[in-house]
């Protein structure tokens, strides 16, 4: 006797199984591509935001007498994620600064909706020798050093 039923899958079952595998592969590829795009965007934001905030602060501090006396002309100012997190105070951001004379950190109150700009009177310079110098002890900026915000 010739039995028409066998243990091998029929052609229709094979094509359904093959199309399911292809669909799973396509979903996996799309998920991997989306993951790479999102990861790239997060990395870009994480690398651009500190430079933007630092450039804004550097612009505001241009010509400040205490900055000029302690650090010289600021050459770079970049937000430090690691120092900010290690500080433990969520209301304070730490910036790594390099000037023409010296380098150190700036301890700065966060910009909020209530305070849309950095409060220069509350900034403290922390030198790597341990000294902390508040900017509030400085005489006012000369009018020529004030840069209007745009």
Image (cartoon, rainbow, N blue to C red):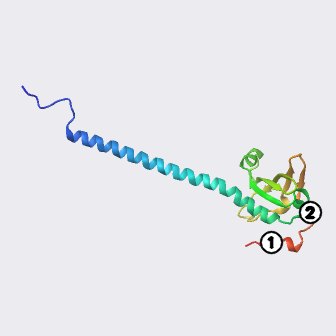
Picture residue at 82% right of the left edge, 60% below the top: 74
Residue 75: image location, x then y, percent:
80, 59
* Farthest-out residue, left: 1
Is 21 situated left or right of 97 in this image?
left
Q: Quadrant of the C terminus?
A: bottom right
- Local packing at callout 1 (Cα closer than 10 Å; few below 14, some 14-19, many 20+) is few
Looking at the image, the residue that sits furthest to the front is: 100
Q: Is residue 67 above or below residue 12?
A: below
The quarter holding residue 56 reads: bottom right
Q: Nearer the viewer, residue 37 or 73?
A: 73
Task: Residue at 71%, 49% (x, y): give it.
Answer: 81
Using the image, tell me which numbered label, if any, was put on residue 60: none
Judged from the image, the secondary structure of the residue bearing numbered disc 1 is loop
Find the distance from the CA under tag 2 to the CA under tag 1: 18 Å
Q: Position of residue 63 (x, y in %)?
A: 86, 66
Label 1 sits on residue: 147
* Residue for badge 2: 138
Q: Residue at x 11, y 32 (%)?
A: 4
Of residues 109 and 32, the one drawn nearer to the viewer in this rendering: 32
């Amino acid at each position: 006797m010739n039995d028409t039923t066998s243990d091998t899958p029929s052609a229709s079952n094979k094509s359904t199984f093959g199309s399911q595998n292809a669909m799973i592969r396509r979903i996996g590829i799309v998920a991997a591509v989306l993951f790479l795009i999102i990861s790239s965007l997060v990395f870009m934001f994480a690398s651009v935001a500190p430079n933007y905030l630092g450039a804004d602060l550097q612009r505001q501090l241009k010509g400040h007498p205490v900055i000029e006396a302690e650090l010289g002309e600021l050459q770079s100012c970049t937000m430090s994620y690691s120092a900010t997190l290690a500080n433990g105070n969520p209301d304070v951001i730490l910036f790594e600064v390099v000037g023409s004379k010296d380098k150190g950190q700036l301890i700065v109150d966060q910009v909020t909706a209530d305070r849309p700009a950095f409060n220069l009177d509350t900034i403290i310079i922390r030198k790597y020798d341990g000294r902390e110098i508040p900017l509030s002890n400085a005489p006012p900026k000369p009018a020529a050093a004030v840069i209007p915000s745009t």
